[in-house]
């Protein structure tokens, strides 16, 4: 039976990078006889414009019915001042939460060809291969109560809540340990247990889960130190497991070690490996419409989709190899350009990956 892939290009550079990723996906579909059927819908600002909400019920139903979802990026200045309840980002949070996509895998892998594009010295990043496992449907992003109000004094105040239950921590910890087990067998759990109650529970539960993984070396690190260690000596890390907000921040930080946020793909998985695949970056309003965004994070997200949702590791490997071959040719979008390389644009980069895959 054919597999249904729902494509959500989103906003800003979303449609530009998605056009290239779809070319790669369609070629892989033909070449490896994957029997995928692609359909399209809107999420984020584009959905606000079309449906009046950032995630329409019918879109959510299509996403539920799909075997996998590929997302570009959402958000932009056009919608920054609308009612916060229908901001584009709310649509993204809702689809993650409604589909139970709690396990977010963000691999920060340095292609050796991009050592010069990294913001760190080549010797510090050479061979870098980190996987950040970010909890994606809990914590401060979703905690209740949350409120903005005006106090009797007339002063405005607002607050958020950072809750984690034992079961939420346990299931993401397992993802972290399972990933570490098939990689370098090292798991670093990042928290703020010296201050936060939720982090104290986090640390205790991760320790307990670790008892079932005697083959994985578990360590704990405070998030402030982790942010520093990531730029001091990033290769000490194999798998990092952390909460929703810390994972958001640390993955953007880690992306620069690989040359650019435009290189970081992600997989957001439920407990059955149904997934939504998306670059870690946003809609990049500052370069949207110029055709210069790096499509590789989205193309590599296609590779993750083939690997995690469809067990097509041969096709997934081939896409990664095609990306590597294109980098060998010296083609670079502006974000990963360095001396001696050829500057190219979004479409030419996508075409080059297609040619390499063909
Ligand atoms: P951003 O990731 O969109 O951009 C940060 C910087 O990185 C910008 O200078 C941008 O030009 C650059 N950049 C990002 N992706 C790039 C690419 N593929 N190629 C080249 N350069 C790239 O983050 P931001 O500016 O903080 O946020 C912009 C909007 O995107 C906001 O509305 C935000 O909420 C949204 N956002 C969405 C997602 C998502 O949909 N998953 C993720 C992050 C931010
Ligand atoms: C990401 C983004 C989102 C997040 C925003 C747009 C809600 O930054 O996917 O990393 O914080 O999760
Ligand atoms: Mn982010």
Image (cartoon, rainbow, N blue to C red):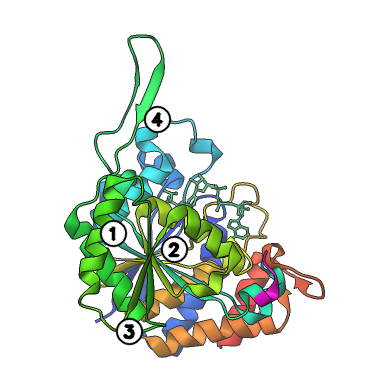
N-term mark: 2 or 1: 1
Q: Secondary structure at mark 4?
A: loop
Q: Cβ–Cβ below 8 Å for labels 4 and 1?
A: no
Q: Secondary structure at mark 2?
A: loop
N-term mark: 3 or 2: 2
- How dense is the environment of label 4, judged by Cα within 10 Å: few (below 14), some, or many (20 and up)? few
- How dense is the environment of label 3, judged by Cα within 10 Å: few (below 14), some, or many (20 and up)? few
N-term mark: 3 or 1: 1
C-alpha separation, residue under disc 4 versus residue under disc 3: 41 Å
Front position among marks 2 and 1: 1
Q: Cβ–Cβ below 8 Å for labels 4 and 2?
A: no
Q: Secondary structure at mark 1?
A: helix
Q: Which residue is the site of mark 2?
A: 278
In the image, which disc is placed on residue 311? 3
Which quadrant: the N terminus?
bottom left
Q: Is residue 138 visible?
A: no
C-alpha separation, residue under disc 2 versus residue under disc 1: 28 Å
Tell whether circle 2 marks a residue whose Cβ is less than 8 angstroms from ligand 1: yes
Q: Which residue is the site of mark 4?
A: 83
Q: Examine the rendered structure and indicate whether residue 292 appears above or below residue 218.
A: above
In the image, which disc is placed on residue 82? none
Q: What's the magenta bit mostly, secondary-structure-wise?
A: loop
N-term mark: 4 or 2: 4
Q: Which residue is the site of mark 1?
A: 203
| First to last magenta residue range | 119-123
User: Toward which corner of the image does residue 85 lie, by quadrant?
Assistant: top left
Task: Indicate left or right for 308 with 129 as reference.
Answer: left
N-term mark: 4 or 1: 4
- How dense is the environment of label 2, judged by Cα within 10 Å: few (below 14), some, or many (20 and up)? many
- How dense is the environment of label 1, judged by Cα within 10 Å: few (below 14), some, or many (20 and up)? many
- The answer to which of 274 and 215 lies nearer the viewer is 215
Q: Secondary structure at mark 3?
A: loop
């Amino acid at each position: 039976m054919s597999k249904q892939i729902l494509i959500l290009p989103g906003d800003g550079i979303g449609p530009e990078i998605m056009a290239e990723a779809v070319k790669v996906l369609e070629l892989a579909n033909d070449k490896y006889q994957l029997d995928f059927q692609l359909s399209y819908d809107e999420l984020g600002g584009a959905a606000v414009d079309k449906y009046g909400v950032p995630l329409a019920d019918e879109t959510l139903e299509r996403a539920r019915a799909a075997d996998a979802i590929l997302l570009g990026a959402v958000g932009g200045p056009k919608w920054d001042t609308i009612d916060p309840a229908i901001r584009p980002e709310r649509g993204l949070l809702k689809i993650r939460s409604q589909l139970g996509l709690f396990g977010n895998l963000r691999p920060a892998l340095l292609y050796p060809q991009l050592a010069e594009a990294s913001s760190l010295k080549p010797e510090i990043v050479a061979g870098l291969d980190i996987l950040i496992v970010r909890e994606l449907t809990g914590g401060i992003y979703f905690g209740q109560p949350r409120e903005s109000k005006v106090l009797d004094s007339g002063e405005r105040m607002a607050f958020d809540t950072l809750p984690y239950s034992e079961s939420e921590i346990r299931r993401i910890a397992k993802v972290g340990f399972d990933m570490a087990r098939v990689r370098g067998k090292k798991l670093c759990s990042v928290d703020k247990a010296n201050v936060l109650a939720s982090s104290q529970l986090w640390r205790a539960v991760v320790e307990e889960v670790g008892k079932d993984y005697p083959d994985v070396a578990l360590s704990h690190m405070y998030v402030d130190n982790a942010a520093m260690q990531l730029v001091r000596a990033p290769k000490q890390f194999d798998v990092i497991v952390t909460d929703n907000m810390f994972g958001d921040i640390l993955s953007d930080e880690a992306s620069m070690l690989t040359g650019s946020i435009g290189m970081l793909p992600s997989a957001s998985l439920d407990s059955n490996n149904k997934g939504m695949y998306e670059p870690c970056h946003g809609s990049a309003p500052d370069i949207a419409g110029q055709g210069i965004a790096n499509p590789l994070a989205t193309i590599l997200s296609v590779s993750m989709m083939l690997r995690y949702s469809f067990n097509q590791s041969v096709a997934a490997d081939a896409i990664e190899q095609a990306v590597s071959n294109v980098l060998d040719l010296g083609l670079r979008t502006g974000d990963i350009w360095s001396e001696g390389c050829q500057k190219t644009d979004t479409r030419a980069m996508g075409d080059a990956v297609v040619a390499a895959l063909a």
